[in-house]
Amino acid sequence: MKTVTTTRYVSDYEYEATNSQGLKVKIDMKDQGKADQSPMELVLSALSGCVAVEVALMIQKRRKTLVDFVIEAEGTRRDEAPKYYTDIHLKFILTSPDANQEELEKVTKLSLEKYCSVASSLKANITFSTEIVRS
């Protein structure tokens, strides 16, 4: 299964990515006056979103009630380029009247280690290829 996005230049520090369905995400690399997330912030958002969906589905499959759910993601990056994440901490804030601590720990661990494709991608040995087309 392939996923396709197209990223277009808006200005030196602003870009817009569009997927094949036409859904857009703005990318902002400015230091001051930011309006949108940077690519690395989007990585944390993608990870949190992926894990959240999996956790919510597993809680529902267990016939438990999910009242509220927040994930706070904090990433630590290298100081020198490339400034990739070396550590990511996810804080799960779950409100459920009928799911116990053990169940919540199990579903968050399963989501992160088995089902979330973003988490797996961050651990993967990915092969990159490029093609240059001048217009």
Image: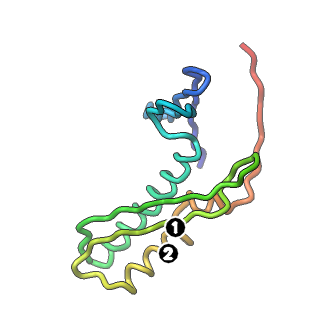
Q: Residue at x 43, y 61 (%)?
A: 72
Q: Residue at x 51, y 31 (%)?
A: 32
Which of the 4 image quadrants contains residue 3? top right
What percent of the width, then of the height, locates residue 113?
56, 72
For the C terminus, give its image quadrant.
top right
What percent of the width, then of the height, locates residue 53?
40, 61
Instruction: Using residue 10 as the reference point, say whether residue 52 is left or right of it.
Output: left
Q: Which residue is mark 2?
A: 110
36 or 62: which is nearer to us? 36
Three-letter residue code for mark 1: Tyr
Q: Identify the colour scheme used.
A: rainbow
Marker count (numbered): 2
Q: Are marks 1 and 2 in contact (CB under 8 Å)?
A: yes
Instruction: Using residue 114 as the reference point, say whether residue 49 is left or right of it.
Output: left
Three-letter residue code for mark 2: Leu
Q: Residue at x 36, y 84 (%)?
A: 101
Could you give the CA–CA distance between mark 1 and mark 2, rounded to whole angstroms?
7 Å
Q: Is residue 95 above or below residue 106?
A: above
Which of the 4 image quadrants contains residue 132? top right
Q: Secondary structure at mark 1?
A: helix
Q: Which residue is mark 1?
A: 115
